[in-house]
Image (tube, helix red, strand yellow):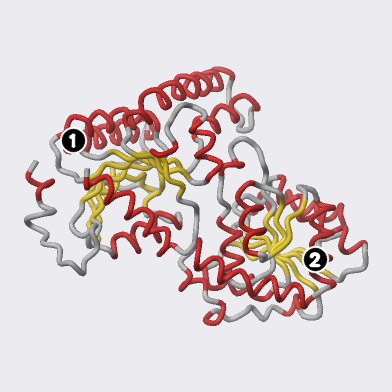
Amino acid sequence: MASKQSIATADVISPHQSPLAGVRVLFVAPDDYPAFRVDLVELFSNHLVGRGLKIDWSLRPYTDGPKRVDVRGAERFYIARRQMTEKFGSLRYMMAETRLRLKLAWRATRGEYNLIQIRDQPLWGIVYGIAARISGTPFVFWMSYPVLEARMRIALHNLVPMSLPARFVRLAYAVIGSVLFYRVVLPLSDHVIVQSKRMLERVAERGIPTKKMTPIPMGVTVERYNPASIPATDDPRLIGKKSMAYMCADVLNLTTRLTFEALALLVANGYDTVLVIIGAVSAHEREQLASQLDRLGLSERVIFTGRLPLVEALGWVKRVDVCLSPFEMDAAQQVATPTKLVEYMAMGRPIVATVHYDQSEVVNRSGAGIVTAFSGEAIAEGVARLFDDPVKARTMAAKGPVWVKANRDYARLADEVERVYTSLLAR
């Protein structure tokens, strides 16, 4: 238990330091290493580590490599051996990861951490929840996504090609895991971080007290999204045309198709318009999209930027007239807090977003855009309103950065996480 006492001994905290100074957290998550998700990098590695928090990470290596511990200042990354080219490479990696995480759980049981946090790994929550109870360490479960519900949906609707036995295994995992998660893991936790108010409501319907949960939505670090410091792209394909941008991670989904439909309707109504798709597009995906665009007569009106560094991507956002944020309202997506929406707003762009719990609230409260129905026709109508009234578009755009800084800046969200952590540690 010596390390738990180190907050008061080895790490002397002055009155001017953050209450997190010297606190060591074990953070287990299914995310790739090196981490790229903005909430991990900005919220934790930037803001919270900057306040003195120390983190031991268990993430999944993106590429093959040996077992190791990468030390980066106050962060230690525990990485299991991964060699996918070997025979049974996936199975060997799973076994190596399990051994590593059991060792970390043993360290947690001995009280080597001030706080234990598991993200989006329901069954590991049982192991670490028990370790936390034995050691008396506060235990936080972070729900950034309804993992079990998503797995069940994929299996039921066969959204990912798989054999019938594989579908059965996935369904069984989702059903059994859901029972264990809501009846064992979350009751074991001292606090639950959820991504949105809607997720809080849904978890509360399963019997978890609302006072035990805190919504922490996706956000941005406003210093990185400062339109004054980011040059707009000067691509000649935009000269003399009205333009829209859509930032996306999956170009083959329904939402991308809606942006194409909106573009086709705008062109048919006389608007000389181009659509910029910002995000990675593989050769296979580009081939599939080409036939769809040819059929709609839009081949020369869609620009695929591919994966870009952040500043270059934001340069496109700054240059276009309107930014699009269509978002589905299925059971998994309705609890999300779309990052692209606040990225657009931070860059001072007018938005056309579709009806969605978080998006509707953000756009309506900020006044930074228009909310439409989830259809190509409705999106086109919203965009046309902004094209036709540039003064209104500029007025809406100016409201975005102010609202984001006050509500979705990671510096502010870090305050919320700090409040949760210090409250748990004070007990």
Q: In the image, is 256 to the left or to the right of 414?
A: right
* Residue extending furthest toward the right: 269
Disc 1 to disc 2, C-alpha distance: 60 Å
Where's residue 184, x and y in %?
Answer: 36, 24
Number of marks drawn = 2
Numbered badge on residue 136: 1
Residue denoted by label 2 = 301
Rendered residue at 56%/50% (across/down): 337
**Neighbourhood count class around disc 1 (C-alpha, 10 Å): few under 14, some 14–19, many 20 upward:** some
Q: Quadrant of residue 384?
A: bottom right
Query: Where's the N terminus, which quadrant?
Result: top left
Q: Please, what is the three-letter code of the amino acid marked with disc 2?
A: Arg
Is residue 139 in sight in this rendering? yes
Look at 7% across and 45% down and name the residue there.
Answer: 2
Mark 1 residue type: Gly
- Say which element carries label 1: loop
